[in-house]
Image: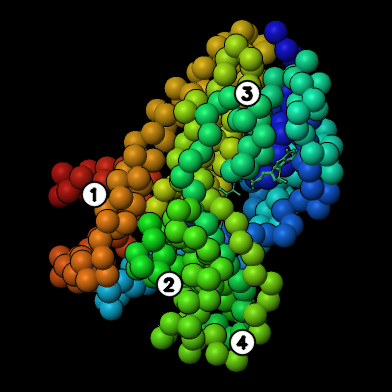
């Protein structure tokens, strides 16, 4: 049995895993192909406050804004879900990565940056280490150990605009299956003077930059960014399904984060699911090295804690993906008539729809 752990990928998932393992006294080394971690930030950083707290990161110095809710636009209708309490923070992704790096190395994890781990290098590392693959959506570790490939992706493009943002408390989400098939477009106040504009489209539907250009010409969007300076724009991808198996116990290899497809299929948010999975993986690996506990416990733990929520997110994604603009508009107007704006504002949970339903029924029974 191997007694060391090598974490491949120093994104948030890999660094959280490395931090927890090092805390548990396990010899841990984290590798990343980049020398400057988290740069360029091709992803957004909207993360629920509850979710952030669950990761145990001292994230505060990476916060650039705080959100109270969302305007959801579809088929000419708008639903406003605004809570009295802050719901999410927007974080600077490079700073968040650095906070996670500092925590992992302070806990005792070693880091080797600027090293791409593929082919023979994987074999060399695997000789004496349990491997945690945290190497993102196109994982060399998942491929090397034949742990199943992710076939469903969202292609994204996002850019920041330097401008005065009038409403910093709300994010705008645009659902339109012609423009953003199976996903959505967004405008997010990253701070009072940076507005992020982005779009995601189903991987089978071509070019996310072309979709982005169409989106920024749309009425309501074009006026908003008119005259603002566009900063760098980036294309990226989001995995939309989990891999067949997140662990191979015999080979002592585990996958966490985007490498495992541990992402919400509605919003593409992966920091909370991936980070929590990384914590579970570390716990099981530490128990495996110390007491011989089976690594397969990680798969069971992950599915038990997040399986239902992933299925609920997937179900919601399937519903809105199958509707045309007219039906989406009708759905939004119906939801407003039924008073769902305040329902979501009171009971909503960005990450865990199962908790939202639980809270609603428990309060209903208590009345
Ligand atoms: C446009 C966009 C918007 C998003 N918005 C949000 C959001 O608002 N909130 C949210 O929670 N999530 C969001 N996400 C998803 C989120 O960014 C990911 O789920 C998260 O980054 C996954 O973290 P990770 O550590 O698993 O993988 P990554 O962040 O991809 O990190 C993987 C690391 O592995 C390294 N690596 C890869 N291959 C190798 C190799 N062979 N050898 C060595 N190193 C390697 C990479 O350099 C990288 O540092 C968004 C994603 C996109 C694309």
Which numbered circle lies on residue 172? 2
Res 102 visible: no
Asked whether the residues under the numbered discs 2 and 1 touch, taking CB atoms below 8 Å apart as contact, a structural biologist would say no
Asked whether the residues under the numbered discs 2 and 3 touch, taking CB atoms below 8 Å apart as contact, a structural biologist would say no
- Image location (x, y in percent) of residue 180: 41, 65
- Image location (x, y in percent) of residue 157: 57, 65
Mark 4 vs mark 2, CA separation in Å: 18 Å
In the image: residue 55, left or right of residue 107: left
Going from the N terminus, do you reach mark 4 or mark 1 first? Answer: 4
Residue under label 3, please give it: 145
Going from the N terminus, do you reach mark 2 or mark 3 first? Answer: 3
Mark 2 vs mark 1, CA separation in Å: 25 Å
Residue under label 4, please give it: 228
Please state which of the two labelled residues, at mark 4 or mark 1, is closer to the viewer: 4
Going from the N terminus, do you reach mark 4 or mark 3 first? Answer: 3
Q: What residue appears at the point 22 percent right and 43 percent down from the top-left corner?
A: 362
Please state which of the two labelled residues, at mark 2 or mark 3, is closer to the viewer: 3
Q: Quadrant of residue 280?
A: top right
In the image: residue 278, left or right of residue 329: right
- Is 320 in front, or is 89? 320
- Is 328 in front, or is 155? 155
Res 298 visible: yes
Q: What residue appears at the point 42 percent right and 35 percent down from the top-left corner?
A: 306
Colour style of the rendered protein structure: rainbow
- Is 327 in front, or is 1? 327
Mark 4 vs mark 1, CA separation in Å: 42 Å
Residue under label 1, please give it: 360
Q: Dot 2, how many residues are within 10 Å of its Cα: few (below 14), some (14-19), or many (20+)? A: some
- Residue 112 against residue 224 in the figure, above or below: above
Mark 2 vs mark 3, CA separation in Å: 41 Å
Q: What residue appears at the point 51 percent right and 46 percent down from the top-left corner?
A: 239
Q: Dot 3, how many residues are within 10 Å of its Cα: few (below 14), some (14-19), or many (20+)? A: some
């Amino acid at each position: 049995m191997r007694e060391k752990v090598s974490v491949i990928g120093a994104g948030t998932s890999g660094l959280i895993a490395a931090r927890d393992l090092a805390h548990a006294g396990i010899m841990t080394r984290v590798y990343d192909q980049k020398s400057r971690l988290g740069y360029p930030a091709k992803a957004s950083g909207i993360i629920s406050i509850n979710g952030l707290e669950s990761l145990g990161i001292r994230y505060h110095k990476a916060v650039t804004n705080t959100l109270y809710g969302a305007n959801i636009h579809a088929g000419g209708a708008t639903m406003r879900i605004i809570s009295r309490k802050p719901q999410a923070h927007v974080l600077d992704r490079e700073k968040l990565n650095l906070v996670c790096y500092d925590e992992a190395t302070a806990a005792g994890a070693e880091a080797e940056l600027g090293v791409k781990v593929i082919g023979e290098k994987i074999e060399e590392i695997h000789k004496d280490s349990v491997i945690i693959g945290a190497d993102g959506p196109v994982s060399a570790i998942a491929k090397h150990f034949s742990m199943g490939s992710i076939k469903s992706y969202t292609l994204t493009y996002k850019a920041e605009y330097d401008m005065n943002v009038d409403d910093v408390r709300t994010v705008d989400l645009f659902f339109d299956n012609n423009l953003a098939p199976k996903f959505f477009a967004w405008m997010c106040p990253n701070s009072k003077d940076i507005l992020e504009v982005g779009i995601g489209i189903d991987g089978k539907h071509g070019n996310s930059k072309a979709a982005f250009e169409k989106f920024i010409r749309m009425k309501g969007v074009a006026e908003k960014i008119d005259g603002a300076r566009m900063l760098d724009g980036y294309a990226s991808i989001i995995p939309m399904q989990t891999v067949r198996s997140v662990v191979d116990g015999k080979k002592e290899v585990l996958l966490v984060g985007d490498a495992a497809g541990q992402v919400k299929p509605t919003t593409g948010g992966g920091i909370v699911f991936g980070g929590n999975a990384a914590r579970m993986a570390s716990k099981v690996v530490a128990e495996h090295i110390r007491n011989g506990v089976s690594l397969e416990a990680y798969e069971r733990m992950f599915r038990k804690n997040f399986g239902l929520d992933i299925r609920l997110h997937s179900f919601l994604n399937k519903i809105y993906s199958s509707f045309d603009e007219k039906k989406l508009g009708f759905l939004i107007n119906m939801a407003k008539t039924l008073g769902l704006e305040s329902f979501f504002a009171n009971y909503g949970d960005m990450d865990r729809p199962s908790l939202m339903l639980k809270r609603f029924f428990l309060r209903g029974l208590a009345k």
